Image: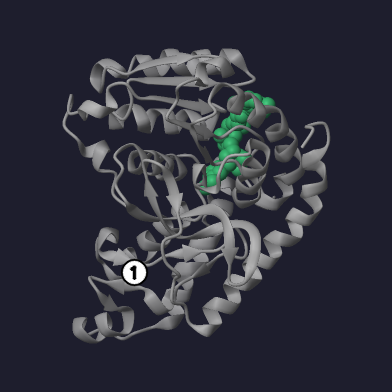
Amino acid sequence: MATSAMKAPKGAIHEALKAVKIAVVGTGNVGSSTAYGLLLGGLAAEIVLVDINKPRAEGEAMDLSHASPFSHATRVRAGGYQDCAGASVVVIAAGINQKPGQSRMDLVHANVAIFKTIIPEIVRYAPDTILLVATNPVDILTYVTWKLSGFPTHRVIGSGTALDTARFRFEIGRYYGVNPESVHADIIGEHGDTELPVWSLSSISGMHLPDYCRHAGIQYDQKALTTCFTNTKNAAYEIIKRKGWTNYGVATALTRIVETILRDEDTLLPVSMVGKFAGVEGVALSVPCKVTRLGVFHTFTLKLSPEEESELRMSAESLKLVLKQVEPHLTQGLGL
Ligand code: NAD
């Protein structure tokens, strides 16, 4: 999950990235931190910030521009939807965020209403772009974005469980005292309360966790690992209780996804896309997907244990239930 572009030496922008424009719609905590990650990564020649609160977008653009002499010669400016024209990727972080005690699903109606106004505008000016959704509940809004945009599924990506997976690897790495980069363990399903860990495929340097423990001479303790997952699942609630929002983790995940697209990496990332999961069709959720210059693709079926398969189905079904409430509202006033 390391962001190699953020480690790249100053001035080492790949030739092909010199003409790249990225737009960020919604420049609050998440959007502005993502723009900062993109700037430090040297991932684009131009970053355009769009927000209903124009002074906020202008202020963020001014502030970020002052970081460019220390990082990369990226032009950062505030703009309108017309300035999304030609953007390779449009990151969408517009909408309301969770208040302490709220779940992501509590945001669904307000954020769907916002997306009904912004997605047609983005599509009008950037019909060939890739849409990368961060706004919560992200799986529902990834589906809604796909529906409102009329784009093929591969050009609509939700950040999904990329962040949860990073949190999970961090927790497992901390528990075993190894660098999280050596941990391969994914969270799949909803980015939210029904997400699940794929224990059956989790490994450290290619060794399944019980094998790793045997070779490292330590006791395998499933209870401690369950705590790693609980900490992962509750991380947003715990952070929001303390500071009011989350931004750095998700911004780094979004930066990494954009990097994967722009560099055409073929990296497998747990991100959200519309498809059929555990027999449930027409939902968006996360499983490891191949991310390329063209967007996101399901290229294989994850071999899950029967329990994991059933948990994934439950996660998909719970999202489908929400979509059944949301779907009738998507056609109103849009001529769809
Ligand atoms: P924020 O309130 O700081 O920023 C939201 C921004 O959206 C504001 O600047 C606001 O003016 C703008 N906005 C609202 N309506 C708009 C519209 N119609 N057009 C354009 N801009 C509009 O919120 P935040 O903390 O940055 O969170 C943004 C979203 O990201 C929330 O839904 C939050 O839950 C979500 N989030 C997702 C993840 C993830 O992993 N996917 C992680 C953290 C937060």
Left or right of 202 on screen, residue 191? right
Looking at the image, which is closer to me, 329 or 182?
Answer: 329
Whether residue 101 is visible: no
Locate residue 175 relative to residue 164 in the image: left or right. Answer: left
Residue 161 in the image, given as x and y percentages of width and height? 49, 56
In this view of the protein, which residue sits in the foreground, 36 or 333? 333
Please give the name of the residue rendered at 65% of the width and 67% of the height, measured from the top-left corner: 280
User: Which image quarter holds the C terminus?
Assistant: top right
Q: Exactly how many numbered labels are in the figure?
A: 1
Point out residue 197 in the picture as x, y percentages from the top left corner.
Answer: 48, 70
Out of 281 and 106, give the one closest to the viewer: 281
Residue 210, quarter of the rendered image: bottom left
Helix, strand or loop at label 1? It is helix
Reading the image, the residue beneath label 1 is: 175
- Residue at image position (27%, 17%) is 73
In the drawing, does residue 13 fall left or right of residue 1?
left
Q: Quadrant of residue 225?
A: bottom left
Type of residue at label 1? Tyr
